[in-house]
Image (cartoon, rainbow, N blue to C red):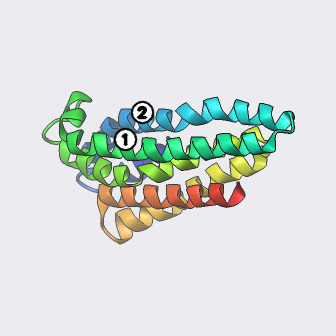
């Protein structure tokens, strides 16, 4: 959700379309929150089970839990993308898009959905890092993605003149960096 806030700060500064583009991005926020909730769905249940197994010295079972959650996160991200993508127009209109704001919301969401894997897996697996007592590493995961997004947003939005699409690309690249960091840290 932090990515969305950063995107909104930069998008508000786009000349001539700032407010309409900002509204379009705001319409995507509930969908992003739903994707985030699914990222937490399996990991919030799996992390305490994993911690209990580790505490009992049952490392193999703990690793199986992590593996099962990872697979569920993969499946969930694919299902979310495959379900939302073809129905994004009616979904965006239900969440309040107008004919003026829809193009911006659609541009952002269409690209953002391509990075659903990074958002769901990065968030979900980061919970295991935190659960194992590596809170600093978990915090670094969030910071890496946030800093990357702060740097990449103006490059894609203004330098490459991509507007809302650039914000979405910067976001999925940043989430990808964060997800890679999580997988490296596991």
**For the point 26% across and 52% down, which residue is it?**
107
Q: Quadrant of residue 32?
A: top left
Q: How many marks?
A: 2
**For the point 19% across and 33% down, which residue is it?**
93
Mark closer to the observer (2, 1): 1
Q: CA distance from mark 2 to mark 1?
A: 9 Å
Name the side, left or right, on which 14 lies relative to 132: left
Position of residue 41 measured from the top left corner of the image (x, y, whole percent): 53, 31
**For the point 56% across and 61% down, which residue is it?**
177
Q: State the residue position of label 1.
A: 80
Q: Secondary structure at mark 2?
A: helix
The label on residue 122 is none
151 in relation to 121, above or below: below
Q: State the residue position of label 2.
A: 34
- Closest to the observer, 9 or 125: 125
Position of residue 141 measured from the top left corner of the image (x, y, whole percent): 65, 52
Mark 2 or 1, nearer chain start: 2
Classify 10 Å Cα crowding around label 1: few (below 14), some (14-19), many (20 and above).
some
Name the side, left or right, on which 81 lies relative to 1: left
Residue 122 makes an appearance in the image: yes
Position of residue 128 measured from the top left corner of the image (x, y, whole percent): 69, 42
Circles 2 and 1 in contact, beta carbons < 8 Å? yes
Name the side, left or right, on which 122 lies relative to 106: right
Position of residue 102 measured from the top left corner of the image (x, y, whole percent): 19, 42
**For the point 24% across and 34% down, which residue is it?**
91
- Closest to the observer, 107 or 73: 73
């Amino acid at each position: 959700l932090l990515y969305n806030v950063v995107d909104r700060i930069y998008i508000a500064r786009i000349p001539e379309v700032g407010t309409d583009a900002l509204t379009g991005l705001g319409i995507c926020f509930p969908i992003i929150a739903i994707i985030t909730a699914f990222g937490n769905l399996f990991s919030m249940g799996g992390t305490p089970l994993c911690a209990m197994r580790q505490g009992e010295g049952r490392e193999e079972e703990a690793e199986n839990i992590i593996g099962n959650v990872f697979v569920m996160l993969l499946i969930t991200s694919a299902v979310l993308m495959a379900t939302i993508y073809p129905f994004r127009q009616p979904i965006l209109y239900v969440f309040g898009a107008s004919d003026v704001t829809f193009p911006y919301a659609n541009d952002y969401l269409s690209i953002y959905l391509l990075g659903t894997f990074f958002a769901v897996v990065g968030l979900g697996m980061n919970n295991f890092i935190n659960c194992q007592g590596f809170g600093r590493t978990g915090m670094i995961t969030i910071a890496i993605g946030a800093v990357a997004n702060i740097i990449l947003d103006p490059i894609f939005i203004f330098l490459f003149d991509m507007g809302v699409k650039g914000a979405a690309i910067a976001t999925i690249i940043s989430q990808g960096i964060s997800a890679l960091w999580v997988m490296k840290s596991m």
